[in-house]
Amino acid sequence: MTDFGTGGALKGFKEFVLRGNVIDLAIAVVIGAAFTAIVNAIVTGIFNPAIGALFNAATLNDALDLRIPTTGGGVSVIKFGVAVAALLQFVIVAAVVYFALVLPINHLKKVAFARQQEEAAATPAHLPPTEAELLGEIRDLLAAQADAGTLPTTTGKHAVITAPAGKPAS
């Protein structure tokens, strides 16, 4: 349970708001809203009238109207032009986002990955082996000696017992 009286809730709210991803998200929403206004202006001011002119209408929103009779004797209008205009606006927004944001970010990621690969390849090869690598080599040597029929002994610094042919080492 949160203690609202001691300022704990305000401290938690401050930590939440000052996290980087919350601020980045807020900036993205503001930029997105401004970007949408620009695209709306271009679509409604340039593309809709130009495409509407092809259909002999003032704008695309007024084009492609389908008039159908109603049961009360009147006429209802289905405006396919509005749907086409919205689809056109979506395609333009998607194209601008892809070419202005996605492609450059993907390129930057590719460059960063290539730089990391170059740095990894540029690490010196004369570094001493790690403890894990040494232990792995010791394990492999012991396994090879066991397979060859020779086992290390405790009598002597480098003494090895060799098993006679056909008999296992003891």
Image (cartoon, grey):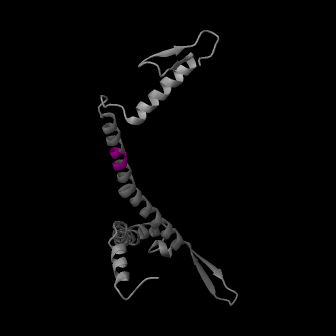
In the image, residue 165 lies at what x, y percent? 61, 9
Indicate yes or no whether the magenta region holds residue 26: no
Badge count: 0
Q: Nearer the viewer, residue 49 or 97?
A: 97
Magenta highlight on residue 110: yes
Asked if residue 55 shows in the view, the reply is no
- Residue plotted at (47% across, 82% down): 1
Residue at 43% from the left image edge and 70% from the top image edge: 48
Vertical placement of residue 124 versus 11, above or below: above
With 153 as the anchor, is 12 left or right in this view?
left
Q: Please name whichever residue, 65 or 133, is drawn nearer the observer in this view of the structure.
A: 133
In the rendering, at what x and y percent does residue 22 appear? 37, 70
> In the rendered view of the protein, which quadrant contains the C terminus?
top right
Residue at the image position 49 percent from the left and 20 percent from the top: 153
Work out whether residue 7 or residue 39 is closer to the camera in this orientation and state it. Answer: 7
The range drawn in magenta is 108-112
Question: Residue 65: percent from the left, percent from the top?
Answer: 56, 75
Q: Quadrant of residue 156?
A: top left
Q: Position of residue 18 (x, y in %)?
A: 32, 72
Q: Residue furthest top?
A: 165
Judged from this view, the residue extending furthest toward the front is 155
In the image, 90 versus 135, the foreground residue is 135
Q: Is residue 75 left or right of residue 113?
A: right
Residue 82 seen: yes
Quarter-wise, where is residue 162 in the image? top right
| View extreme (right): residue | 71
Q: Quadrant of residue 133?
A: top left
Q: Is residue 120 above or below residue 45?
A: above
Magenta span dominant secondary structure:
helix
